[in-house]
Image (cartoon, rainbow, N blue to C red):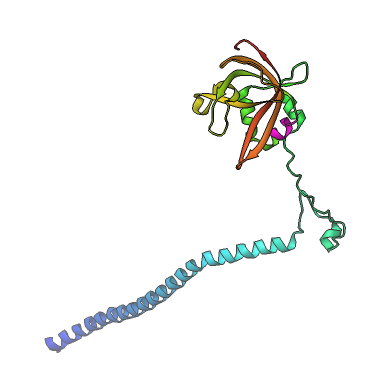
Amino acid sequence: MTSPAHRGGDLASPLHGFDQEPSSRHSIDLCAGDVFRRRGGDVMKVEEKLLKMIPLVATLLLAALILAVAILLPPSFEGDALPAKQMAGDVSELAVPQKAPSYVGPTLQDIKHYLPQTQEGHFKISVANLFYTKESLDVHRILAGQTIETTGQITFERTQDSKRPVIKVCDFGLGSFFRPARYSVELEFEAEIPHMKHREWVRLVGMPVYKQEHGKLLLSLRVTRIEATSAP
């Protein structure tokens, strides 16, 4: 008859074997899981490197595509295309570049377009506009040989350089900032000076005279005819 201890040992032996089998399986599972975790980490690292290289690869492919298109497609010329001879190096028929036209300035016809003329052909111009003609070299070169007609008041002004009063024709107009301004032009008489009153309104016919004195351009009117008139 078997003792209880032996029976217990017999009973414990199967249980002991039963307990050891799961332990071995668990160890195998742990080893396999460790291997898979290591391999999974390596795969993730490789994937991260590949993702970082995608923009660089895409840029290189795009640059290669553009370069291939530029090399394979023939060049096209628009607009002023050069002839085949010139493209081959024959420059014998190249047009010689022309110089830009030089500045001509206003002409007598331009003056006639802007200034009205009397029946006698005299240019009608105000004292103020006559005064400003000395500011333009082109204009006073044209008017220097022309006869003009203007209307204004006679004034007698004394200066330190002259022993007798300087006779001028003056008129009022708009100056800077639209303020009233007085414009005057000195008069020259070839014959005897006619009798005139101060502030008398007259109509004058004569030729503008421009001359340089002490670095300044001076303007005077050489009178050929003068007559009294009413105020405009």
Q: Residue shown at 12%/86% (left/top)?
A: 4
Image: 67 above or below 121: below
Q: Residue shown at 79%/50% (left/top)?
A: 98
**Image: magenta residue range:** 140-145
Closer to the camera in the image, 218 or 62: 218
Image: 12 above or below 197: below
Answer whether residue 112 is magenta in the image: no
Q: Residue furthest left?
A: 4
Closer to the camera in the image, 218 or 232: 218
When asked about the image quadrant of residue 204, the answer is top right
> Image quadrant for the N terminus?
bottom left
Closer to the camera in the image, 125 or 223: 223
Closer to the camera in the image, 2 or 184: 184
Counting labels gives: 0
**Of helix, strand and loop, which mostly describes the magenta segment?**
helix
> Image quadrant for the C terminus?
top right
Q: Residue shown at 22%/85% (left/top)?
A: 13
Q: Residue furthest top?
A: 230
Image: 224 above or below 53: above
x and y percent of residue 228 in the render?
65, 12
x and y percent of residue 120 in the render?
78, 17
x and y percent of residue 142 in the render?
73, 32
Q: Is residue 7 left or right of residue 210?
A: left
Q: Residue shown at 74%/29% (left/top)?
A: 110
When asked about the image quadrant of residue 104, the answer is top right
x and y percent of residue 114 in the render?
70, 25
When asked about the image quadrant of residue 9, the answer is bottom left
Image: 164 above or below 84: above
